[in-house]
Image: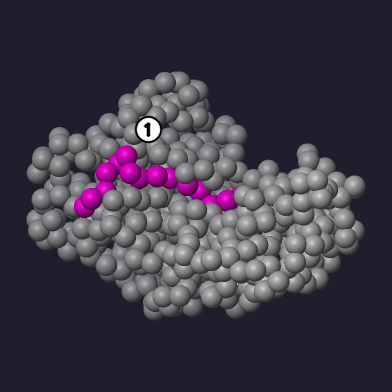
Amino acid sequence: MSNDLEQTTGPGRRGFTPPRHGRQKRRGGVVLPAVAGVLTMGLVLSGAYAAYAYGRLSNGVTKIDAISGNTSDKDDVDGQAQNILLVGDDHRPDNATPEEMAELSTQSDGGATNTDTMIVLHINADGTQATMISFPRDSYVDIPGVGKGKLNSAFYYGTLNGGGDTGGAKLLIRTIQQLSGLTIDHYVRVSLLGFYQVVKELGPVEVCLNQAAKDPYSGVDLPAGKSTLDAKQALSFVRQRHGLPNGDLDRNVRQQYFLSQEARKVLSAGTLLNPLKLGNILGAVGGSIQTDTDLVSLGTQMRNLRPGNIQSATIPTLGTPTIYVNGSALSIVEVDTVGIPAFVQGLVGEPEEYTKATASQPADVAVTVLNGSGVSGAAGAAGSVLTARGFQVGAPGSSETTKTTQIQYPTGMEARAKAVAAVVPGAVAVRSNSVTGVTLVLGTDGKTVTPVPAAGGEASTPADGGSAGASTDAGSKPSASTSSEPKPTSTDVKSYGKEGVCIN
């Protein structure tokens, strides 16, 4: 995928077209999983050195006012849980020496600042479980006030017109909140050099690959099986995207895996009980961080967290197509925006109001059916079956393609949504602020309304295999063969923090 700052569709900030910053010269680019340093630091600060650490860090960390206002309680999908946006950028500090640049296998970037790693660390209310949610840098999303663009440019656009780093952080946070529905409670950003220095202080890290990896762009050259990486090799490991089947999506896996393995290492007695090593780690990471809060508070929130309880996931995607913007080719990650609410709910759990609700009677439920499956007539067929079951059904419509069949409902309509869920096995009921009534969105997973049982007890099936009723949904997409349908990337939650785990 292109490493250039993305082009946008729609109005840019004052019509400004971002410069390329000479990134084409570096071909493979540099993607920074510097959040390893942040997670490492947070876990360290949860130990007995908090008071010592606070004094050591207070002079080095840059505070910025990144969090502006709070989402109302009714819009906060995860209640008392905490969401920390961990950002790694590829900016090289002005004081980096040529020797340090060479050690990082890179060169000066001319001042560019692209947020190449964006992970929301979701910590449950009691602090015992956490999930790292990766947002691929090339995700093509709506950037508020800018238009469509790659996610890694949101920070850049926020810095324009005097916004600076604070403006960049705020626009990136707004973009991720709008995309995911999660409320960001805290923000931490770490630089390329900071990541390298932290890993260098921690010492060698062991990783395990199911197959050998070699990439001249990132510099990785590892055999199958276990390998012990120094800081330079670790940086190459998490930068690799060439030679991986899913490019940047597989690079997210590299980053999640490395973070989890690093967390295992930092919680070892050899790290936590070594004041000299701890001091060096804190000194290395402190000067490379921007945050809205004090780091000891973040560490306290994670005091009960253990590596085996840190899981990893990536937002649902539909592929990595090449699109054309203003006549220029642009490689992107297509996000399953319709499916994200169901994905997030799978991580944070059903709302208590839905769990306790008793399903309404079908006659009391009005429902709209939207077709996001790519199969013409699917919404009309589902609507016909719902009508036969006694529901009040509106005209069928279309939706952007999504993998997951879901029942979207606004706050207060939990009982009605539960009635629809009872006749659509496998569908996910999701609270949503984007709908005003119960809405069944059909996905590519093929789940739909169960036909009304026939007199003999068996469900009746339309003779044409499911296209009864309206033959074409309003605005529906043409029928597509299985080979041409999107192939969504798995968003299964993984646990990479356990000993002996290997990845591809």
The residue that mark 1 highlights is 233
Q: What amino acid is at disc 1?
A: Gln
Residue at left offset 72%, top offset 55%: 449
Which colour scheme appears in the figure? one colour
Secondary structure beneath label 1: helix
Q: Among all residues in the image, which is located at the extreme front?
A: 456
Quarter of the view holding residue 427: bottom right
* Left or right, 305 with reference to 336: left
Q: Among all residues in the image, which is located at the extreme top?
A: 224
Is residue 352 at least partly visible in the picture?
yes
Is residue 480 at least partly visible in the picture?
no
Q: Is residue 322 magenta?
A: yes
Quarter of the view holding residue 170: bottom left
Residue at left offset 54%, top offset 75%: 412
Query: Label 1 neighbourhood size at 10 Å, few (<14), some (14-19), many (20+)?
Result: many
Residue at left offset 9%, top offset 56%: 52
| Count of marks overlaid on the render | 1
Residue 151 percent across, percent down from the top left: 54, 59
Decide which of 471, 458 is in the foreground and name it.
458
234 w.r.t. 223: above or below: below
Q: Is residue 243 magenta?
A: no
32 w.r.t. 408: above or below: above
* Left or right, 80 with reference to 145: left
What segment is highlighted magenta in the picture? 303-325
